[in-house]
Structure formats: C-alpha cells, structure tokens
Image (cartoon, rainbow, N blue to C red):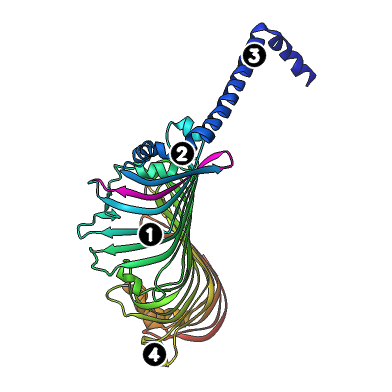
C-alpha cells in the first residue's frame, strides 16, 4: 500500500490536480444548493399553486403517452422528498378525441430522474378501481376502451412510457372482455390487481383476478422478464407463473382455443413457463384434474378420465426436445376397449419418466434416451387405443396384449440416415405375459432383469 501511495504522490502534488479538485468541490456545492433551491421552489411556489399548471401537466402527460389527457383536479403534497400528486376525474381520449378511459382517482409520485431524462418519470403510478373494456372485432382488430391497438407494434409510445416508470399499480379493477370474432358472451373479471416494477431492463409483474365462480377460482399470474423495447419482443427473455386452484376447463373454450377436443373437465393447475429471445422454451405444470373427457385426434375415441395428477414438463430447443413427468397417475372413468371387456378401469400408478431426444441440425445422428421408474404394460396397452400412435406399434400392442410390470427402465438409441445404429436397454420385469400370435408361442409369469445392447 505504501508503494502504491508513493507512486501517486507526483500526481497529487501536480498543480493541475489541485485545480481539478477545487472545480469539483465548487460543482458539488453548486448542484447541492441548486437542488435545495429547487425543492424550496416546489414546496412553497409550485405545489401550493399546482392548479395553475394543470394545462401544462395535461400537455406533458399527453405527450408522454401519445393520447389526449384531461384532468379535472390536482392536489399536491410530499412523499419524503418527492412531489406527490393526486389527480381526480382523469379522462383519456381516443385518436378521434372521444372520451375512452375515465379514472376517478390517479395517484402519482414524481421521480427526480425526470430532470435527467427531460420527460415525465414516476416513482409510483397508482390507479384505483377502474373499469377497463377490451374488445376484439370480427376482423381481428383489438381495442382498449375504444382505442385501437396497432397489432404491428409500430406505435409503442405508451408501452415504452410504461416500462420507463419505476412502479405501476392498479387496484380493484374490473375488466370486461368482448370477443365478437368468436361470438362469445362478455367475460367479466373482478377484483383485478396489477403491479409492475421496472428496474432498468428488468420488469417484474403480478396480476390477480376473480372470474365468475362457475368458471374458475382466483387467477394468479406473475412474471419476471428482461427486455428493452415492446416493439422488439424477439429480444425478451424471462419466466412466467400461473396458478388456478379450480377451473372448469371445458367452459373456458368459449374464449380460448385448445389444441385438443375437451368436452368436459375441471381441476387445478400451477404452471411455470420459460421464454428466451421472444420464443417459448420450457414448461412445467402441476396438474390435478377430475372428470376429464378429451380426444387427442379426430380419428381416436374420447378418453374419459376420472382423475389425472402429477407434474409434467417439457423443453424445446433447435436441437431437440425433452419431456418429463413426476408422480404421474391416472384412472379412467368409463373404460373402453380391453379395459371394458375386463370390466376394470385403466389405472396408471404414480410413476416418474424422462424422455430426451436430440436431432442436431446438419444431418448429424439423432440420439434418444428414455427412463421410467415403473410401467404397467396392461394399462399402457389399453391406453394405446386413445393415443396418436403409428399403425405398427398400435397393432403390435393389440396383438401381443402385454401384461405385467417393468421397472428401472433405461433405453438409449442412436439413429443415423434413418437407420438404427446402436441401442441399449436395461430393465426389470415382473409377471410379464405376452399373448401367443402366429409362430410366437406367448409367455406368462416371467420375472427377471434384461440388459441388452
């Protein structure tokens, strides 16, 4: 340390260093007293007469969000050293000048960073008990309180302004969604609470809403994302979480599209989703479903589930995908095919599994790996009638009618040029039985282990 300080002595002793130091001290005191004078001016001159500046505030807010804003009344106070404004009877007009959004009360705490940015910056923006109307027309156009939303993302002034504020809160809102394109009845969400915290390029939000009790319990949605521009969502990454303790899955099809036919079903879900560079990346869901009827393809019979539970997840990348499950279990409600003939429902006991399939670009070899803690072959053979399988595997399961249990299953394979290059198989089997067919004699009561490659 002494040697380092010794090297600095010539620099500290130079006359220019002393001059720079004196200038820095003067600048500091100048800024300090300027800031104090600014606070005094706000406290004793501007804020007590804030009504006299209402038109200028309306102009600044209108310029910030790109829409015409009128304010009925402004009351000012202090939140620490930050000016605290309460706006009453706030009206936002659409592009044609017609009133579109009305707020009884808007609370805003100004941020001193407004000076550095030469624009309106808020430490807090809070709106209490607003009513928000969302609509989609027959042509697919979206409107928020009658204000058209540019789907091309060309006008992102409002979005960019929202992301620039430190914190935004909406409490006790009512949201009405009308979808004339689907000819659906209005969906009303009550007790909607929303919060958004922005710190640089990091944006965290939380949303809770209460749908009609016949549709679902309270919806809890949260997110943590990183991004800069809402007009360039392809650069955004982050995670989202949703929780619903009860939902009538079939009724929600009135407003949502499902990838499969779901005539009826209800249950609870917790789900985590990951996004990278604007694209969906992975999903994990805890499911507890009851009385579910679903059809996985148009040419397949409907699968009637009494209950389904467990954690399932998947991850997609440019080089492959992975699917996993933990404590996945199901029980059919109205069994058909082989289960119906035996008079027993199809039951899958809680099991864990993992599938990893890699297909690198450029024609490289494809690799796969599958593990499972235990599998009931009879249940899987019965479920085959409801699954979108190729004709070969489906027919083989029907012909051989396997029964018994396999556990500690590990399978790996490599395919190149459409041909199987290598494989490995390790498992334990108990009470294995296969039906005789043609020259195959069949078997029953087999137990042991298998290690093949």
Please tell me which residue lies in front, 130 or 249. Answer: 130
The dot on residue 340 is: 4
- Residue on which disc 1 sits: 419
Q: Quadrant of the N terminus?
A: top right
Distance, label 1 to label 4, CA atoms, is 38 Å
Q: Residues within 10 Å of mark 2 (few under 14, many from 20)?
A: many
Q: Earlier in the sequence, mark 4 or mark 2?
A: 2
Q: Earlier in the sequence, mark 1 or mark 4?
A: 4
Boundaries of the magenta span: 79-95
Helix, strand or loop under label 3: helix
Distance, label 3 to label 2, CA atoms, is 33 Å
Tags 4 and 2 in contact by the CB under 8 Å rule? no
Using the rendered image of the protein, determine whether residue 132 is visible from the camera's viewpoint. Answer: yes
The dot on residue 70 is: none
- Residue on which disc 2 sits: 121
Q: Earlier in the sequence, mark 3 or mark 4?
A: 3
Q: Earlier in the sequence, mark 2 or mark 1?
A: 2
């Amino acid at each position: 340390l002494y040697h380092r300080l010794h090297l600095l002595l010539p620099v500290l002793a130079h006359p220019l260093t002393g001059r720079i130091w004196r200038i820095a001290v003067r600048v500091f005191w100048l800024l300090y007293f300027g800031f104090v004078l600014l606070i005094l001016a706000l406290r004793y001159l501007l804020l007590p007469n804030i009504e006299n500046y209402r038109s200028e505030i309306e102009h600044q807010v209108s310029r910030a969000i790109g829409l015409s804003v009128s304010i009925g009344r402004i009351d000012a106070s202090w939140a620490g050293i930050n000016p605290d404004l309460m706006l009453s009877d706030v009206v936002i007009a659409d592009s044609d000048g017609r009133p579109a959004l009305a707020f009884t009360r808007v609370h805003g705490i100004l941020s001193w960073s407004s000076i550095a940015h030469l624009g309106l910056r808020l430490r807090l923006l809070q709106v209490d008990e607003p009513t928000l109307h969302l609509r989609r027309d027959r042509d697919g156009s979206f409107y928020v309180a009658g204000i058209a939303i540019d789907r091309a993302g060309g006008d992102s002034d409002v979005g960019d302004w929202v992301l620039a504020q430190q914190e935004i809160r909406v409490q006790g809102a009512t949201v009405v969604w009308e979808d004339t394109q689907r000819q659906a009845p209005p969906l009303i969400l009550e007790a909607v609470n929303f919060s958004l915290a922005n710190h640089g390029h990091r944006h965290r939000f939380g949303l809770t809403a209460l749908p009609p009790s016949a549709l679902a319990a309270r919806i809890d949605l949260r997110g943590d994302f990183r991004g800069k521009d809402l007009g360039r969502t392809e650069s955004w990454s982050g995670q989202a979480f949703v929780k619903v303790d009860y939902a009538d899955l079939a009724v929600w099809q009135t407003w949502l599209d499902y990838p499969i036919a779901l005539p009826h079903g209800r249950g609870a879900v917790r789900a985590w989703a990951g996004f990278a560079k604007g694209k969906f990346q992975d999903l994990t869901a805890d499911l507890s479903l009851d009385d579910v009827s679903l059809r996985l393809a148009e040419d397949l019979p409907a699968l009637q589930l009494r209950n389904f539970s467990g954690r399932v997840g998947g991850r997609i990348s440019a080089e492959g995908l992975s699917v996993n499950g933990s404590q996945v279990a199901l029980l059919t409600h109205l069994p058909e095919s082989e289960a119906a003939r035996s008079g027993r429902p199809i039951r899958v006991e809680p099991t864990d599994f993992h599938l990893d399939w890699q297909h690198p670009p450029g024609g490289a070899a494809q690799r796969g790996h599958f593990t499972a803690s235990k599998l009931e072959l009879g249940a899987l053979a019965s479920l085959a009638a409801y699954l979108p399988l190729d004709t070969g595997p489906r027919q083989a399961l029907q012909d051989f009618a396997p029964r018994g249990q396999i556990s500690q299953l590990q399978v790996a394979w490599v395919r190149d040029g459409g041909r199987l290059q290598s494989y490995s198989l390790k498992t334990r089997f108990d009470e294995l039985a296969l039906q005789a067919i043609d020259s195959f004699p069949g078997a029953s009561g087999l137990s042991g282990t298998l290690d093949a490659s």
